[in-house]
Image: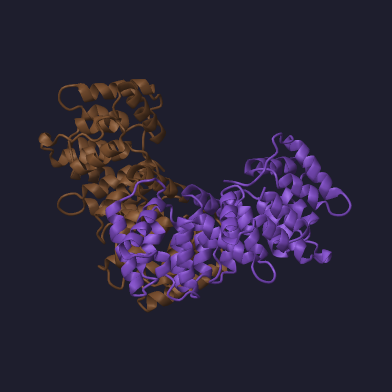
Chain colours: A purple, B brown
Amino acid sequence: MATLKVPAAVPPVADDCEQLRKAFQGWGTNEALIISILGHRDAAQRRAIRRAYAEAYGEELLRSITDEISGDFEVMRSIHHWSSSPHALASPDLSHSPDCDDDATQRAVILWTLDPAERDAVLANEAARKWQPGNRVLVEVACTRGSAQLFAVRQAYHERFKRSLEEDIAAHVTGDFRKLLVPLISTYRYDGPEVNTKLAHSEAKILNEKIHHKAYSDDEIIRILTTRSKAQLLATFNHYNDAFGHKITKDLKADPKDEYLKTLRAIIRCFTCPDRYFEKVARQAIAGLGTDENSLTRVITTRAEVDLKLIMEAYQKRNSVPLERAVAGDTSGDYERMLLALMG
Amino acid sequence: MATLKVPAAVPPVADDCEQLRKAFQGWGTNEALIISILGHRDAAQRRAIRRAYAEAYGEELLRSITDEISGDFEVMRSIHHWSSSPHALASPDLSHSPDCDDDATQRAVILWTLDPAERDAVLANEAARKWQPGNRVLVEVACTRGSAQLFAVRQAYHERFKRSLEEDIAAHVTGDFRKLLVPLISTYRYDGPEVNTKLAHSEAKILNEKIHHKAYSDDEIIRILTTRSKAQLLATFNHYNDAFGHKITKDLKADPKDEYLKTLRAIIRCFTCPDRYFEKVARQAIAGLGTDENSLTRVITTRAEVDLKLIMEAYQKRNSVPLERAVAGDTSGDYERMLLALMG
């Protein structure tokens, strides 16, 4: 259900590196060439290119990208700090006066080029450091990645930031959100298919009682959502629906604008219908004046190798317009080119 | 700092298997032979023996051990369920009328034969299911194993029990203990040597304030103990000592019999002085009438390949008697033989 298009005959890694090097060294911008290569290579191929590029030219590919495509300083700093090249800590050149399109393009190309686990670690770090209640990145990373993948993110976080992800969330997030998000990201869920039906019934009842009493941050709600396996939770939510006549997400809409309730609903939707969850993120990113580029880039770069096809189908169904067309209408230049490349 | 003695020339795995098979098949008990082999093989060698034994005889080694050394039903059931042999779910034969020594010997031989991560998973499962406030097994597993090792325990737990460890703890433990133990076992601590001195100072102050107000289960105490790296925590505890004139463990002794406070002290001692922590567990297991065999077995089987030498040194220093002599005086028969083998 990925959308990424890799050519039938992928050029040798050395050729890709050489082309990229030429793009970085030429006069003027060569974003189109960079995108035409990296936007059509899968995670393993991008990893091989990064390794071969660093060996051949003594410079990290990510550093070369940020030198070529000027953009947002903060992401660059984060990336540069990552790289172990001798230039890693050099100050970036801000004289380019980067414009918004450059920012968005750079961010998209860099996030895409990273390994999935590294990418999630960078996104989660940004979300933890600049945390605000409307941010759903931590929920997405915790609930739409498999158990092994989530653990790989936590390992990449150690390597990159010399701290643990849960440590940063616990230090920056407060109150009920902390109580919910720290265990959500720390859990190593069992990912087998086994379901305990009796347990699904009893825990659906617990959830219903707590929700009925508006005890949304009760320990039991948090325990169930943060420790049970995905298969078990799906059974619990289904039974909730059968036993109480409506979806649990509907019962969690008492105050539709409450961000904590929105977070609970996002967790449940990430488990039950990740494609429709991400469709909504993309829809809201495009809707209205201006584009929420960070959200749009996040959906497309994190799902292009996973289930972007399903998300695009859900978008078409919901909005009667293809997501590609909506993206093309709302973005421009290299940023548009990059997103459309990843959408196949 | 391990005590395990492996012979200079280890016999081929096939020979070990053949000797073990003979011990299991002969008339009468051959515990001495079983102990003389398994009690002198390291984790990798035991793993190789288990694999080769199952291939050669179509039966799990652990199943053969429980058939030969009669003992405690529950551990056997747990082990048998693990094994994938055709006999795995057969009812154990209870007609042996196992006595206490057999129970203890069987438990020691089986726990020792398991891989360290499997062993911890079995111990943690037992602790979670039969949880009571005085049980320190979860603290030991969470705080004296490295981050990668603790994660291996959680993986072994999935494989064995088809659930997650944090799920079982959250379901069986309640109140402040749950609030503390679930994040303690779920964390993937950063394990690098970096220390943030400013942070150590500010968090020592937070700990002191909360302890001063007897807010022992405050979110901040739990956050610090369950998310910071070991190196960072050691710096924090040292600064606590310097700034407030006594050890944090002393300030946590307001009510020496309170099990929650004892648990907090155990966590800190597992980080700061695991050898002296385990010395105390061994001392208390031996002290008084009768022996706490489960605790003694746990200390010796889980530390023989890690730091049992240091624990024995601490014991000698504290009690002016060698631990081997104390163990020999307090135990007998095959159980004594097994423990002394692991103590080198």
B151 to B50, vertically: above or below: below
Give A268 or B241, whichever is nearer the viewer.
A268
Give A148 or A277, whichever is nearer the viewer.
A277
Q: Residue furthest front?
A: A320
> What is the quadrant of residue A213 in the picture?
bottom left
Residue A200 visible to the viewer: yes
Count of residue discs: 0
In this image, A187 relative to A118: left or right? left
Give A169 or B301, whichever is nearer the viewer.
A169
Q: Position of residue B189 (x, y in %)?
A: 48, 56
Residue B177 visible to the viewer: no
B135 to B113, vertically: above or below: below
Residue under the point 37% across and 79% down: B213
> What is the quadrant of residue B334 in the picture?
top left
Q: Position of residue A114 (x, y in %)?
A: 65, 50
Give A194 or B299, whichever is nearer the viewer.
A194
Q: Residue furthest bottom?
A: B213
Residue under the point 32% across and 36% down: B113
B330 to B237, vertically: above or below: above
Q: Position of residue B262 (x, y in %)?
A: 30, 64
Residue under the point 41% across and 45% down: B155
